[in-house]
Amino acid sequence: MDFMGGKRNRNRIHTLRSAVGTYARRGAAAVLALLLTVSGFPARAFAPGTAAGLGFAAGQVYAAERLVKAVTYMGSEWTVNFWDSELSTMEQDFRQIRKDGFNTVIIAVPWRQFQPDLNAGDLNPEAYLRLRRIMAAGEETGLQVMLRLGYTWDNFDRVRDVSDRYRRLRTDPKARERWLSFAKSVYGTASSFGSFGGGFLTWEDFWGFMKETETAGNRMGRAAVSSGYRDWLKENIPAEEIALYYGEEAEKATGSDAVFPGSESPARRFVYAWNDAWMNSLLEDTQEVFPGLSMEVRLDIDPVPNLYGYQDGCTHNVTFPAGNAPYTCCMYSAAMGYPAGSLISADQGIEKAWEILGELREDAGKPVFIDQFLFTDNTPEFSHNAKLREDEIPEYITGMAPVIREAGKGYAVWTYRDYADNVICNGQFAQGRKGWRLYGGEIVTENGNSMLFLQKGDAAEQNLANQFTVLPDEDYVDFRAEPVSVAAQISQSSAAQGAPAGQGTAVTQEAPDGNAAADSVLLEISTGSAVKQIRVDQAGLFRVSMEKSNSTELMIRCLEGNVRIDDVKVYSFVTEGGIYHMDGTPGPYLEAVRTLNRLLEE
């Protein structure tokens, strides 16, 4: 079958995997219908801009519904450390989001943050307080709040491997119970607010286990049994099929020493089909305690070897209906469906979107919500993907309005505000000393804003553990700093606490040379052997570039003066969405996004 349309030579299956993922062609309903071959599959044509182009039957009319226009909200951080941040500008940010034409914010809800210990099963009250605050802010500003349930990569606990709980979710019935209690409690909290806009799972947060199964080993061998894969295989795949695809390893498929076939095995197709069944089961169970929960489905076609030395492709169509949810979800990138390295026009991108999203809606049998609409992507790991012509991106954004409207549910942007790959935990000191070792100094609060206060000789240190920035050559250390007298600090620290303050305007400064001014501060910033000094003469945002070091420690030491420090970041890369820059100034695509939102109201 040719999933891209048009016949190709079988030995060029690698062209299927362009972009973040290629798109899925329609398969049959049976389990083995996922196990597709790579020749002779007819391409289906859809007329862009027509109802048939999005899977509508003749004469079929869908009830009009207000489309979701959403932002994945991260504040001034990113999803990894969002729950450690102060949220001091949240209400202000929400009002700006409304002004830009959006009606919803998506909040990533990390399982580990809300239920830190699977064994005890206790919930984290601080996380629920913050969730209530977010829901209340949605009510106050007129935004719906949608939840991405079970986000993996949060900064809550750097000691225990987060992947362990997702592994146990597959292999330990008690972990499944914990997951459901987490989902139920989140739903109970969020749904008590008028701003509650539902939620969804995403396949991405559960894919780590699948990557682990690609490598044979005793642990994953035991997991092939405890996860239920072996029993599923025996119940759903005929013995002759198992023998055919496992080959010499067939005895290890269904016995007590069963293992997962690796990525180079033709039997790998069975693991993909089992995972789809498992995801459907998890979703259905979770929908019992979180009604209406949807799921972002995987549109990628995963290549597997066949018996003839070529490649087949496995789709995930059986997950597309998202259980009993009223809609299904997907990530959609403009790069989908085009070979790596292609430069595509706005018209080409829109035409492909009609086709791909139309097939998803047809296969799902319900509206489609694009929970991540990617029209630009500067992340290094996807630099090889197809890209829109830069000067045509605004045209593409506004031209997607009829596609999104007929898909039926709406869209969300992932990067509303550019963000750094910040590896610091609690860089805004909202959680007090969490993550920091102080040598002198203290955490102080003024008008709801927490800061680190250091006098001469004091220092603060953070172990970055196994946190790594994206790029290999250079890191940046950003922080806000303000010289302050001890007397002023004592006076301000003892003042009554007020409402959360806005962020205000900051001056960005590079580390200057020259003599120190009166009452100025001299700071030493070090990451292992990389050490730099910076003079702070006035309040502002400071950036220090640091050579990469083998050290996992960040040290901030006050050599002269007294200083308050806030908003600490250590990063090497900034993800850009083109809507707002990291400093809050407008990006090149802001007006196009605002226009898209207006068009979706018509």
Image: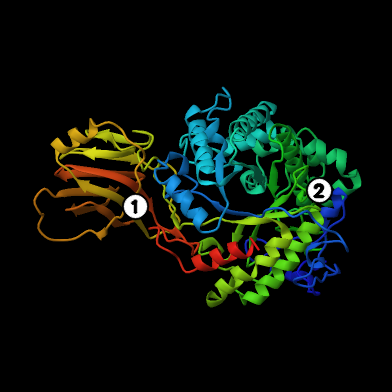
From the image, tell me which residue sits under label 2.
248
Mark 1 to mark 2 CA distance (whole Å): 47 Å
Q: Secondary structure at mark 2?
A: helix
* Residue 312 shows in the view: no
The crowding category of the residue bearing disc 1, from other C-alpha atoms within 10 Å (few below 14, some 14 to 19, many at least 20), is some
From the image, tell me which residue sits under label 1.
549
Towards the viewer: 347 or 597: 597
* Residue 364 shows in the view: yes
- Dividing the picture into quadrants, the one containing residue 453 is top left
In the rendered image, the vertical position of residue 363 relative to residue 257, given as above or below: below
Q: Earlier in the sequence, mark 1 or mark 2?
A: 2
Is the N terminus in the top left, top right, bottom left or bottom right quadrant? bottom right
- Residue 278 x %, y %: 75, 40
Residue located 69% across and 46% down the image: 295
- Dividing the picture into quadrants, the one containing residue 67 is bottom right
User: Looking at the image, what colour scheme do you see?
Assistant: rainbow
